[in-house]
Amino acid sequence: MRKFILSLMITVISVMSVMAQRTITGKVSAVEEPEGIPGVNIKIKDSSIGTVTNLEGEYSLVVPDDTQFLIFSFVGFKSKEVALTNSSTLNVVLDLDVKLLNEVVIVGYGTQERREITGSVASIKSEAIENLMSPSFESQFAGRAPGVQVTTPSGVLGQRPIIRIRGVNSISSNANPLIVIDGVPVLDSDRSAIVDSNPLANINPADISSYEVLKDGSASAIYGSRAANGVILITTKRGSTGKAKVSYNTSLGVNKEINRFELLTGDQFVSIANEKRTNAGQSPLAVLGTNTDWQDMVFRAGFTQQHNLSISGGSDATKYFFSLGFTDQESSIISNDLSRYSFRANLNHSVSNRVRLGTSLSYSFTEIVGLNVGPGFLSGVIYNATRSLPNVPIYDSENIAFDGFNVTPNGSTTGFGNNLAGPDNNISNIGFVIQNNEYRNRVHRMMGNAFAEVDLLQGLTAKTQIGVDITLANDFRSLDPRHGDGRGSNGDVYMGYSPASRWNWQNTLNYQTVFANDHSLNITAGLEYQFSKFYNFFGQGSDLSDSFYRKNNLISGSFNDQFTGGGYTERGFDSYFGRFNYSYQGKYLASFTLRNDGISDLAAGNKRGTFYGGSIGWRLSAENFFNSDLISDLKMRASFAEVGNTEIGSFAAFGGYSPVLGGAGAGIGYDRIANNQLQWETSRKLNIGLDMNIGAVTISADYFKNNINGLILEAPTIPSLGVPKNKINQNVGSMTNSGLELRVMSKVLENESFSWNTDFNITFISNKVNSLVQPLSSAYNRTVEGKSIAQLYGYQWAGVNTANGNPMYYSGEGIVQFNLEQDIDGKNQKTWRAYDPENPANISVLGDFPTRDFLGNTLPKWQGGWSNSFKFGQFDAEIFTRFSGGNYIMNESLRGLLGQGFSNNHVSILNRWTESGQVTDIPKLFTATDQDMWQNSASNSRFIEKGDFVRIQNIIVGYTLPAELLASAFDGMITNARFFAQVQNPFLFTGYSGLDPEANQYSSQLQFGVDYNVAPIVRTYSVGLNVGF
Amino acid sequence: MKFILNTYIKRSLILIALIGLASSCDVIDLTPANLIPDDEAFSTEPRIESAVLGVYESAQIGFYNDVVQRGYPFGAANVEQGDLRGEDLYNDQLFYEITYTGSYSPTSANNNGMWISLYRMINRLNIILEKLDPAFESGLLTADTRDNYRGELLFLRALSHHELLVHFARPYMDDPSLPGVPYRIFGIDEVAKISLGEMVRRGTVGEDYDQLLADLDQAEDLINEGGTFRASWGAVIALKTRIKLHKGDWQGVLDEFKKLEGKYAITSDPAAPFRSGGQSTDNIFSFLNSAESNPGTNGALPAMLGNPNTGGRGLVKISPLIWRADFWMVDDTRRKLTSSGGLGVYTTKYVDATSFSDPNVILRYSEAVLNAAEASARLNDLAAAVTLVNLVRDRSIPSTAASYTVAGLEDQNSVIQAILNEKRIEFLAEGKRFGDIHRLSGEGRMNGVPPKASSRSITNVNFYTTDREIPLSHAIPYTSTRFIWPIPLDEIQNNGLEPIEQNPGYF
């Protein structure tokens, strides 16, 4: 690749000198490029005379007679200084410079040299993450690069991490970045209806050689309408010339929950539960029994392993890379499990010097075993385990009908134990549920592309590439008829099949030239077409004749009620684009892109949009006047682009009637109001940046500002209009993300036995909604003009009245209290009363309802990462730290655990108000007053906390066996071997009182910052081995 | 030279071929597979019938918390909300606690769900109402079919607006000039119509009742007699008896009732309206549920109200208050429409706890009879009133027990009270209790929601079978803000022009 991209620089003979001269000719090659490296710079030492090699790697240079040394340099290879001899032929073999390989950057439909890039591109090294245990690669991006925010919101394997590049760039359209693998935009759609099934979990991280994140407008503009949320370009590993290299990597480990909820013991529960009732004048229900921690039932040490085997190599003409991967990861929550088998074959073949072919093919099979994790679902694992009564046993060995679990004879709820009542909402015995209900998603994923490229003229290359991405997903869910979610319908078996496919065809023409010695041009023009289809159907049976039949598949005739359904949608995209890169002496750099895209989601007349981007760079350090020993490289760059967002929902502009099945029959129902006027959602992105090397320190800094206009919003309409879903897709509103990014890398120490490298990045970011038709509200959040998106919004806690234990809230400026007092003769005493600080015991004056207010922003304002890696002899080590903050979290988990019903509680409820004068933050207990005491239908400042944290993300220690040892012990069979041990997520430093400040129940842009019965994030201990043959 | 030329030509051809192939690719002119476009939705007679069925669907399984679920408004929720706002059903769990204890707010889900799903249904039917004349003119519909559809839709429009008035507005009999609800009479199926819709005000309760009756009078002229699962002439008349009762138009109730006499009959078995597939002589109108389409395990009446021992979830029980009420005879056969377990007594009006296919009974002839009984009593025709109430009562009490007599009941007031008590027994768990509390409080006969058995306090069947003291709570005086529901926050916040007013006291 590198060969042809940089190949066609015209050989220029340098100026003749008056001195005696001779001509040196030769060929430059490398082990990896035995046929010759084109474009190699050749310079006479201490002179400006030089040339470059031609396509075949050959050169010819006239040199003064007194010339002693020639310097050969080429990106990706170590520079070489070669002494001249009497011979007029000088053939040189260059060595690969592994460290510098990153300097060629994939930028979308092509590559660019790092030093010529004028946009903002962050590279993430694959080596840093491929040995880590994680269900998908992107979860390891967190903290690795400035401006790239990745949050793993829970410990459920299969749940997709939230990726935001330079903030939230859309309000109600998709805010995930475009992900492109080997040039093909992947189909990024969760195809499971029953569990979280992250489509990126189908990709084996070990197959990936590099990640590039295109952050600013100009870098991403080549992806035009799909670039608003940034672009992640992924390149998979390919072979290189040479004998086959085999490598095997493995790790084995254990997943543990990082934290558990602190709940009441059975004995504590009895007194608390009865106090709730006696305070309300009701009879006690709880009776001393066992001390059960139901969390023991749902958490475990999950075994986790991964194995990757690859073979790569090739001849001059044909290069190959094959890999096999296997991973099986058990989450710390029973019975969540993810396993993946993957296979990849990447081939490159040169038919001739001018024609090249290649393929990338991968297949993977991913199985996710999930469970009900609904935060408010009665069999939702966290909800249930934290609410179940701690004074009743999990098991009842005599209860054979329910497999020895403690369940009431009618199957409606968990057995009462000694209590006089069952748990609130008749919640099920989670042990039984986990053991008997099954949730399984299986995905066959085939991704591949084939390309051919032809050098038409010198410097002009045509390329065509066809890519496909096929997801064959099937779901299976089986619910036991006896107890839990399946009881209501006497058992239920569901199977769904949801295939999705995409083809993408790209045709590009690339022309590169250097003219008049100093002007280098790189022009790309192309066409792209993409078509995606999404099918789904399901079969479901309930009211089972016998539970025997429900274990593996739908079995005909085993159920009384049968249901089926399905749907189809399709989306198309086409694009005509061009990019123009220009560089003068490598000092002045300019780039311009233009793209015209069409999408099927908009109505005729508005389908097409034109997007552009431009950037300029100035390499000060290449100027003659720039003379600094300290600063070896300094580049300033600026870019501006207008890009778009295509992920606006399929057929977003269309309206009409969808089929509806009612009790009275199948009909049609008005489903969506059409908006033919709907336009593209566009972002204007500005970036100003600076790259420099000061001594051993590399610094990169950027300021950015993204203005998103014409936000496509599912704009809410007043419900009394009865407009379908109370929403209309409209272009309303605008939003800005702006911020600063800084990355500092340095070799702190290096000597023969010890080296220390450090890599630090930090991003400061602020989001502001500039205009909006009306506030957008959800239960916890509100988005309004002038503030950042998804503010927490709700009631303002005013404490507990010390005189009577009443909960108090602000109502406007004043404080009101909810009177916790037993009704007298059915006359309602429990109403809002005014609070008089002078006379707290006075409850005689009626009060207004509490009022709501803004309670904090949910987006972090600063975040970053800091990696320190060490080498000490044969040992290596890395400590990776991540930090984030400036945001607030609504701890809904805690509010739920302070409920006033007959359910278990958080231990802090022991601080409840019990006597006059007591200062506390837990009101008097009073059964069935949850709504008024805690103002449940909105955020509540009582439960809002700062989300700042510092997390030690990874600690890794490795030992590489000495080469001599391997050579003698294995006869050279094994070329390298490294053992390692690692802990992921070992330490968390935070003031947040919940389990984890990154826990988040909702991942939409408008609903955020809510920790609500989220399965705790995992900590992973593992050991492993990398070995090469 | 020739060679070079050839090469150029070859290369150019490849290039042209590539570009040609590529540009022949049309991938963006697509249409959705699951949406019939607006201009084709009423293009055939079967599609018009489908669209009308779509209104029934929206009535039966509407919108709740942004998802179609739980039987809002008339698949189940009207019963659950209507009864749990009253004292005759008892809430045992969190599901209905906000409704039961009266702790709703402009964002709480149940009251929002009712508002949203009712107006969703109303817009669906209003859109169709506007398409009927064009369909007739273009020959798709006969005049009779068009008229029958129109009658059907006008009935459903009145039914849903009345449900809104009961929950979100003060009663007519208090003061008809108080704010009503926005009465929607045109469909919104274009962006341009949004602002017209946003300008519709709440109007007064009086204006809304005028519109209700105008719709029903028109429907009465247009609609045919028919079955029990589609709106029919009988349903229109029966609803008119209910609405006129809310207005206090006693003579009007009697006039309407007379039209029904002879067309329907009270069943001798009180269970028949619930055991006949919804097609007994007493059934006038019900919304159908089926195994394939129902409010689901989190909404269906047999699940929510059913005895856990027979597969229900038992989140709601019959309140011991009515169970122990002295006006309900111990051996009244309607007590057999219940079943008890260790934790309490549950209704058995709804039985299919597995497939949730019980229809939701909306109008029964018995209701029209008791409406007429009350109207007669109000007009001091006590003999007629007692005769009518006995039609309902005598079939349920043992033959040895005495029928009501005017003499036995003493005065007009006690006759009225006997009729109201009879309604509580007869329609227990049919969602009608709050409607009566609403109108009777407006009239001053009741003072708002009476005390209820405290939420989650009835933990044993001995609250029913012994004289164990029932803890009482949750009364809401008529003057309280909470007597009526708040207008949803979204309704006020999302109106870009001029929001309608919130009910006083809510923020």
Image (cartoon, rainbow, N blue to C red):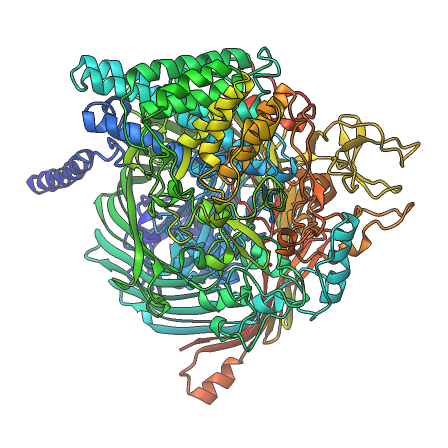
For this rendering, which residue is in front, A816 or A120? A816
For this rendering, which residue is in front, B31 or B363? B363
The quadrant where residue A981 appears: bottom right
Q: Is residue B189 visible?
A: no
Q: Is residue A936 visible?
A: yes
Residue A958 to residue A217: above or below: below
Residue at the outermost left position: B2
Q: Quadrant of the C terminus of chain A?
A: bottom left
Left or right of residue A102, residue B485 in this image = right
Q: Position of residue A510 (x, y in %)?
A: 29, 40
Left or right of residue A146, residue A160 in this image = left
Residue at the (47%, 28%) spot, across then down = B387
Residue B159 to residue A906: above or below: above
Q: Position of residue A911 (x, y in %)?
A: 81, 53
Residue A737 to residue A956: above or below: above
Q: Position of residue A199 (x, y in %)?
A: 40, 53
Residue at the (38%, 19%) spot, across then down = B258
For this rendering, which residue is in front, B492 or A625? B492
Q: Position of residue B254 (x, y in %)?
A: 44, 18
